[in-house]
Amino acid sequence: MSANFAYVSASTPYSNSGGDTSIPLNSINATTGDLIIVALRWEGGGGSDATTATVTDDQSNAYSLLGYMVNASGEDEKVGIFYCLSATGSAALSITATLSVSRGYRRGLAASYSYDGTIQKGSTQTTGGSITGTTTWTSDAALTVLADDLIITAHGNYNTGNKVSATDYGTIRTSATLFSLVDYIPVSGGSYTMGGSMGNDSYVQVTGFFESTGGTPSIIPQIMYHRTQMGN
């Protein structure tokens, strides 16, 4: 059974370079029952940054963590994705993320998606990548998905001015310097590597996907990252 995912809306990016614990995202349009994706980015905690986030909104929806990734090199951006599988909607849903400690270069993006039936997120998996300067970005391994699954990538760059400029698959739904949110709904099942191009920089990303609970076989979401460092 296909979930028939469809993109509804995305927020304009929230960007603030100063240190704080709050990431007040710009509002999005969401209908009751939509899947809400919240992507966050910050820096300043080092390569083993243990900073966590919580996400709330003005409709009292509950958000769960899909996963975090931090660049363990000297360029210490950290990215996280949160989700609400079935939200109470609002034409201007107001979402706020709160960090456990103050961090700088905070970014926040959100998107909403409609679907049929019920959907699921299963267990997660992480993998690492090489550390070299690059103008391309990619998940480290292919995602094996069913037709009409929803793939989400939150992508963080380190050096000001850089962000995702093109994708091999999917659409850049919302993007600001240092941070981008990309989605892809494949028309056929198979293996897909999310990737594309960007300015020469380091990056870290989280990729996961969602599927219908009626999907056969059951494919679980995966989290992946690839981190690179530009030479000083």
Image (spheres, rainbow, N blue to C red):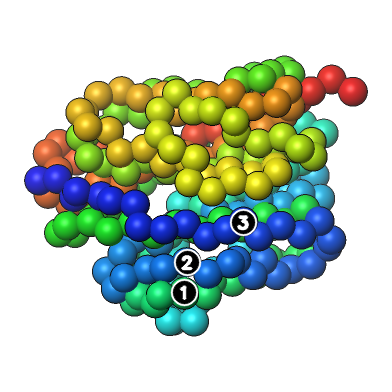
Where residue 126 appears, as percent x and y from the top left, is: 50, 35
Where residue 118 appears, as percent x and y from the top left, is: 19, 59
Tell me which numbered mark, 3 or 2, is placed earlier along the sequence. 3
Q: Image quadrant of residue 171?
A: top left
Task: Characterize the local packing of mark 1: few (<14), some (14-19) or many (20 or more) Cα atoms within 10 angstroms.
Answer: some
Q: In this view, does 18 lie above or below 166?
A: below
Task: Characterize the local packing of mark 2: few (<14), some (14-19) or many (20 or more) Cα atoms within 10 angstroms.
Answer: many
Q: Which residue is drawn at 65% across and 40% down?
A: 156
Q: Can residue 52 be seen in this view?
A: no
- How far is disc 3 from disc 1 in space, using C-alphas? 14 Å
Q: Residue at x 48, y 46 (%)?
A: 173
What amino acid is found at the position of numbered circle 2 in the picture? Ile
Question: Mark 3 highlights which residue?
Answer: 13
What amino acid is found at the position of numbered circle 3 in the picture? Pro
Report if the CB atoms under discs 2 and 1 are less than 8 Å apart: yes
Q: Is mark 1 on a helix, strand or loop?
A: strand
Tell me which numbered mark, 3 or 1, is placed earlier along the sequence. 3
Question: Mark 2 highlights which residue?
Answer: 28
Q: Is residue 137 above or below residue 92?
A: above
Q: Residue at x 43, y 81 (%)?
A: 59
Where residue 223 appears, as percent x and y from the top left, is: 46, 39
Question: Mark 1 highlights which residue?
Answer: 93
Task: Characterize the local packing of mark 3: few (<14), some (14-19) or many (20 or more) Cα atoms within 10 angstroms.
Answer: many
Q: Is mark 3 on a helix, strand or loop?
A: loop
Tell me which numbered mark, 2 or 1, is placed earlier along the sequence. 2
Q: Is residue 205 visible?
A: yes
Where residue 145 appears, as percent x and y from the top left, is: 27, 33
- How far is disc 2 from disc 1 in space, using C-alphas? 5 Å
> Which circle marks residue 172 in the picture?
none
Q: What element carries label 2?
A: strand
> Along the horizontal axis of the image, is 139 left or right of 119?
right
